[in-house]
């Protein structure tokens, strides 16, 4: 899609040379061996002993592109002016606005469905959950021991009471019966004595070795809730604990909003699905990454299709898709085979977001393609695609799924992060001792940083200083976002 001879990417087009150099250093500096592979230790760039490495050469390209872009004499200069490429700042949406807009884009979530408990994890309750029974549903022993009536010592009945049995005979004062945790308490019981707090004598009489407080270790019927009590509000996300509570309260199914259905269209003739890169072809990193990421964001991924750089195939795929959300990858820029914009024009789609003031990922877009279908166009550079996923797809799917927006939170930054002069930056971070520690290898084409990250930090235009509070976007698996995710 990037045409032969075109600059590979000139994302830093608005920076002066010094800023670009600083960013370039951050994006591709060498890390000590293994630091990225040990599961998340921050990659700390040492003074670069390998000046001629591949990474620094790549970064050199950034710098060269930027420098020449600044003189206005290259493709980068043209793009900066926002002419034919259409990526100028004049129509790009501010990052917070783009997210808000994506969250408001869907007109309505689907009608609720009745879902069995084993299929409900991660869905959102479409109706309040009220108890169908008292909990506990009978007076219950909280401990293994004896149920006793009246003052002791007590004569112990021959037969004990186990959990799961029908109503036992009432006790009379002076009587005790062995009882198991969870078993029904007979009528007229004063208290339960734990096995370790009583002893029986040779006449099988029970003596308490501690004071007996009436009602001790008895869970009275309805202690947790009465039948009909509201337990959970509409809109609650079904977590494992919610599944447990719903089952305890008598539910076999819950009324929930169905998962929004998403289809992924991977564009690009240069992509291989297996083996090593060769002859200018590279491995498709997004086909394997996006479906599970979309699932983690609450979607049901109904198809992943590879369309190459074929405008007709894209048009047909859009025409035939009945997904709530179509996610395309690549082809968002203005190269000769970047078909997303022209195809959207051709099918009469309504472009809601056309570029976002965020790095990486600024060519991302959001369109309404049908009455109840949206398209999120993710840029082809893999980290730029992640940025688009979290900026546009996440709020859209959240609304479709009926989920409330998560509380936003901030953490202080561990070390300086250079900013873009006008755009927000999203950078992979690890969270250590309540601080966000920036990871390196955060260039738009790199996944090495995000692969060990706990979250993305939102760096405002102009950059951020150590100690500055930054908004943190959790990654769905890092917050245990309901393991929906990887099924
Ligand atoms: N004239 C301009 N050119 C570009 C601009 C611009 O503003 N003006 N923006 C650059 C930025 S920033 C990005 S990001 C990319 C976005 O490009 P596209 O969305 O059109 O994506 P492609 O050109 O198809 O690919 C870009 C890059 O990513 C690689 N790629 C694509 N798909 C995959 C995949 N599934 N797995 C791994 N890698 C993928 C592709 O080979 C390219 O290297 O545009 C810049 N250009
Ligand atoms: O920098 Mo592009 O925005 O690589 O995503």
Image (cartoon, rainbow, N blue to C red):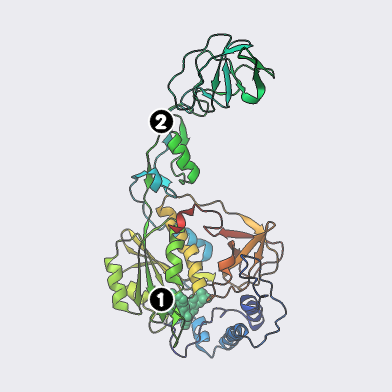
Residue at the extreme front: 202
Q: Residues within 10 Å of mark 2 (few under 14, many from 20)?
A: some
Q: Residues within 10 Å of mark 1 (few under 14, many from 20)?
A: few
Note whether 181 is above or below 259 in the view shown: above
Q: Nearer the viewer, residue 424 or 232?
A: 232
Note whether 136 is above or below 325 in the view shown: above
What residue do we see at 43% from left, 58% from top? 295
Which quadrant of the figure contains the C terminus? bottom left
Q: Residue 69 in the image: x percent, y percent?
A: 56, 86
Q: Nearer the viewer, residue 113 or 416?
A: 113
* SS class, disc 2: loop
Q: Residue 256 in the image: x percent, y percent?
A: 38, 45
Q: Nearer the viewer, residue 78 or 325?
A: 325
Name which of mark 1 and mark 2 comes first in the sequence: 2
Count of marks placed on residues: 2
In the rendering, which numbered label is found on residue 204? none
Give the left or right position of residue 439, taking residue 171 as reference. right
Asked whether residue 461 appears in the rendered view, the answer is yes
Asked whether residue 333 appears in the rendered view, the answer is no
* SS class, disc 1: loop
> Residue 329's quadrant in the figure?
bottom left
Q: Is ligand 1 closer than 8 angstroms to the Cβ of mark 2?
A: no
Q: CA distance from mark 1 to mark 2?
A: 51 Å
Which quadrant of the figure contains the N terminus? bottom left
Note whether 328 is above or below 371 in the view shown: below
Give the left or right position of residue 195, taking residue 341 as reference. right
Q: Which residue is mark 1?
A: 273
Q: Residue 415 in the image: x percent, y percent?
A: 70, 67
Q: Nearer the viewer, residue 132 or 473?
A: 132
Note whether 466 is above or below 250 in the view shown: below
Q: Which residue is mark 2?
A: 132
């Amino acid at each position: 899609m990037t045409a032969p001879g075109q600059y590979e990417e000139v994302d830093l087009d608005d920076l002066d040379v010094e800023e670009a150099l600083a960013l370039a250093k951050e994006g591709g500096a060498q890390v000590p061996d293994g630091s990225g592979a040990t599961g998340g230790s921050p990659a700390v760039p040492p003074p670069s002993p390998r000046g001629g490495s591949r990474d620094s050469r790549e970064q050199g390209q950034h710098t060269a592109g930027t420098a020449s872009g600044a003189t206005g004499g290259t493709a980068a200069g043209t793009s900066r002016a926002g002419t034919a490429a259409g990526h100028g700042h004049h129509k790009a949406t501010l990052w917070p606005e783009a997210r808000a807009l994506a969250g408001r884009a869907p007109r309505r979530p689907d009608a609720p469905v009745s879902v069995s408990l084993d299929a409900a994890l991660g869905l959102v309750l479409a109706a309040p959950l009220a108890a169908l029974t008292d909990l506990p549903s009978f007076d219950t022993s909280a401990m293994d021991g004896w149920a006793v009536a009246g003052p002791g010592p007590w004569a112990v009945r021959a037969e004990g009471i186990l959990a799961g049995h029908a109503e036992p005979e009432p006790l009379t004062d002076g009587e005790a019966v062995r009882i198991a945790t969870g078993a029904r308490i007979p009528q007229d019981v004063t208290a339960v004595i734990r096995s370790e707090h009583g002893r029986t004598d040779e006449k099988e009489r029970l003596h308490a070795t501690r004071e007996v407080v009436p009602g001790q270790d008895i869970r009275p019927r309805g202690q947790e809730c009465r039948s009909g009590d509201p337990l959970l509000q509409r809109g609650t996300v079904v977590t494992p604990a919610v599944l447990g509570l719903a089952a305890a309260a008598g539910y076999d199914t819950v009324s929930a909003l169905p998962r929004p259905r998403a289809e992924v269209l991977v564009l690009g003739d240069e992509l291989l699905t297996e083996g090593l890169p060769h002859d200018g072809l590279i491995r498709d990193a997004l086909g394997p990454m996006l479906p599970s990421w979309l699932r983690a964001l609450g979607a049901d991924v109904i198809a992943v299709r590879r369309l190459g750089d074929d405008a007709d195939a894209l048009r047909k795929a859009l025409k035939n898709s009945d997904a709530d959300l179509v996610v395309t990858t690549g082809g968002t820029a203005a190269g000769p085979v970047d078909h997303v914009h022209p195809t959207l024009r051709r099918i009469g789609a309504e472009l809601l977001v056309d570029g976002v003031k965020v790095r990486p990922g600024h060519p991302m877009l959001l369109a309404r393609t049908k009455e109840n279908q949206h398209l999120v166009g993710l840029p082809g550079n893999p980290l730029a695609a992640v940025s688009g996923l979290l900026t546009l797809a996440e709020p859209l799917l959240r609304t479709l799924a009926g989920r409330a927006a998560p509380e936003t939170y901030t953490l202080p930054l561990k070390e300086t992060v250079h900013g873009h002069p006008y755009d927000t930056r999203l950078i992979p971070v690890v969270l250590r001792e309540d601080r966000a520690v920036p990871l390196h290898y955060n260039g738009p084409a790199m996944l090495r940083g995000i692969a060990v990250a706990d979250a993305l930090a939102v760096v405002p235009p102009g950059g951020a200083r150590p100690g500055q509070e930054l908004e943190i976007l959790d990654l769905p698996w890092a917050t245990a976002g309901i393991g929906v995710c990887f099924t």
